[in-house]
Amino acid sequence: MAGTSPLWVGLTVYALVTLAPTLIFWAALRVPAALAARSRRLSPPPSRPPIEALVADLRRLRRNLRSGAARSRVRRVALQSAYDDVLLEVCAAVGVDTTRLAATPEQGSERAFVRLLTEADLESAGIVLDPADGGRAAA
């Protein structure tokens, strides 16, 4: 009875018996790692920087504006524009309404007034723009 089956059937059974445990262990080790890597690739990156970095940038730009570090008009306008952009990002991160600031023209006293109102709204939301230590963390 043992000699009635063809040779290829015996070789196939032998190959399955010897290779199956190796393939099962390989798959058990590789498949979860591949799935984890795929889920990391599929997760979206953060849409904005952390709030701490945004507030630090806002404070730094505010100090530069107040100190008069920008000597030329071009630098002052660029610094003011950067401050407004970061101010809008912080407002969006905290949930403060930015429609007034976004709707006003870039230059003029009306923009400065709306900027003050937006800064007051940020202060009300809990963001301290002028900390007692000058915006620098204690060492």
Image (cartoon, grey):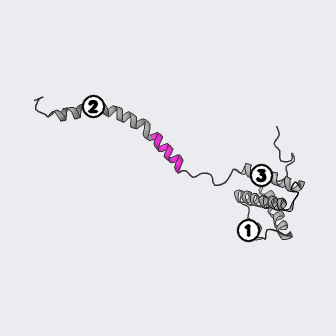
Query: Who's the residue at 57% across and 52% down the image?
Result: 44
Q: Residue 36 at x, y = what percent? A: 49, 43
* 17 relative position to 31: left or right: left
Residue found at x 84% / y 66%: 112
Q: Quadrant of residue 31?
A: top left
* 128, 103: nearer the viewer: 103
Element at label 3: helix
Find disc 2 in the rendering and name its residue.
Answer: 17
Q: Which numbered tag is attached to residue 99?
A: 1
Q: Could one spot residue 128 in this view of the protein?
A: no
Tell me if label 3 and label 2 are in contact, CB under 8 Å: no
Dot 3 amino acid type: Asp
Quarter in which the N terminus is drawn: top left
Distance between the alpha carbons at the discs numbered 3 and 2 = 64 Å
Q: Nearer the viewer, mark 3 or mark 1?
A: 3
Q: Quadrant of residue 84?
A: bottom right
**Against 78, is 31 above or below?**
above
Res 71 visible = yes
Range shown magenta: 32-43
Q: Residues within 10 Å of mark 2 (few under 14, many from 20)?
A: few
Q: Is residue 54 left or right of residue 20?
A: right
Assign the magenta stretch its main secondary structure: helix
In primary-sequence order, the first of circles 3 and 2 is: 2
Question: Which kind of residue does numbered mark 1 sit on?
Answer: Thr
The residue located at (87%, 59%) in the rendering is 72
> Which badge, 1 or 2, is on the more N-terminal residue?
2
Horizontally, is 5 left or right of 109 in the view? left
Q: Which mark is residue 57?
A: 3
